[in-house]
Image: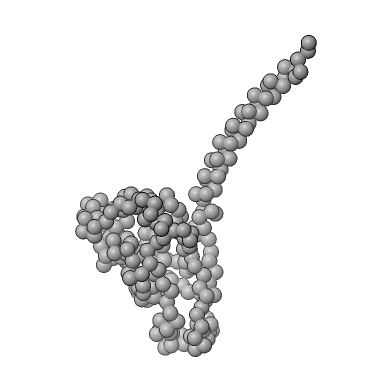
């Protein structure tokens, strides 16, 4: 009785199985690379705003502290957006006729909010509190980068769970004295490791990695 399949089909079957296995591995690798790429995390992507705001001018040139505009960063979960009255504290007197600020003036006098577009957006199932991070000595630059060098603010950190856990497991490199929290150009002393360990003890920092820390 002749065979149902000719001998060469064995070779085809083996080749097909190898291709399927390799395809699965390659697909998994490509998926991981995609998930960790800036295209997926949203890093460095331009975020258009309704009003042009140059942080380089306001922070680097004028020396305005982050907390002047983001006034709730030390007391609340959200750092907050500046009220238009904060903008008009200066621009009611400086550049008060500039066409670039016409939308700001119009919104202020009509008691409307400007619809700013969020740059750093976490999923709804993630809880993040700015105030606790600031209280423990995590500087603004650790998550937001050198905002004082950005004409248009972009997301520089991946904000992935692995990235957050990396800091939660070993917070020492990201800690600084509280008085330097908003100093974006601050550099640690030569023995930065010793400073980090000292601040862990001084600010009572704990390595919180349980799920309930961020997923509540």
Quadrant of the rendered image containing residue 89:
bottom left
Q: Quadrant location of the N terminus?
A: top right
Residue pictured at 51% horizontal, 70% vertical = 117
Q: In front here: 145 or 35?
A: 35
Whether residue 129 is visible here, answered yes or no, is yes
Is 206 placed above or below 16 here? below
Whether residue 189 is visible here, answered yes or no, is no
Number of marks in picture = 0
Is 157 placed above or below 180 here? above
Q: Quadrant location of the C terminus?
A: bottom left
Is 114 placed above or below 192 here? below
> Where is residue 192 drawn, in percent x and y?
26, 53
Q: In front here: 34 or 153?
A: 34
> Where is residue 71 drawn, in percent x and y?
36, 74
Residue furthest top as drawn? 1
Quadrant of the rendered image containing residue 22:
top right
Residue pictured at 24% horizontal, 57% vertical = 204
Residue pictured at 42% horizontal, 49% vertical = 162
Quadrant of the rendered image containing residue 135:
bottom left
> Where is residue 147 drawn, in percent x and y?
41, 66
> Where is residue 190 drawn, in percent x and y?
24, 53
Residue pictured at 66% horizontal, 28% vertical = 16
Q: Please, which colouring scheme is shown? A: one colour
Residue furthest right as drawn? 1
């Amino acid at each position: 009785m002749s065979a149902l399949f000719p001998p060469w089909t064995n070779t085809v079957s083996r080749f097909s199985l190898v291709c399927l296995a390799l395809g699965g591995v390659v697909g998994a690798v490509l998926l991981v690379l995609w998930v960790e790429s800036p295209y997926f995390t949203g890093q460095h992507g331009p975020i258009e705003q309704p009003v042009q705001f140059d942080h380089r001018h306001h922070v680097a040139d004028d020396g305005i502290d982050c907390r002047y505009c983001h006034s709730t960063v030390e007391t609340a979960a959200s750092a907050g957006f500046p009220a238009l009255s904060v903008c008009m504290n200066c621009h009611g007197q400086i550049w008060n006729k500039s066409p670039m600020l016409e939308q700001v003036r119009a919104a202020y006098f009509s008691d409307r909010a400007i619809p700013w577009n969020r740059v750093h957006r976490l999923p709804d199932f993630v809880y993040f509190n700015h105030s606790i991070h600031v209280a423990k000595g995590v500087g603004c630059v650790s998550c937001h980068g050198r905002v004082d060098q950005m004409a248009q603010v972009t997301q520089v950190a991946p904000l992935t769970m692995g990235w957050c856990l990396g800091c939660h497991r070993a917070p020492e490199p990201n800690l600084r004295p509280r008085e330097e929290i908003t100093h974006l150009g601050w550099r640690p002393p030569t023995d930065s490791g010793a400073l980090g360990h000292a601040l862990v003890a001084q600010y009572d920092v704990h390595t919180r990695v349980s799920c309930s820390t961020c997923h509540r």
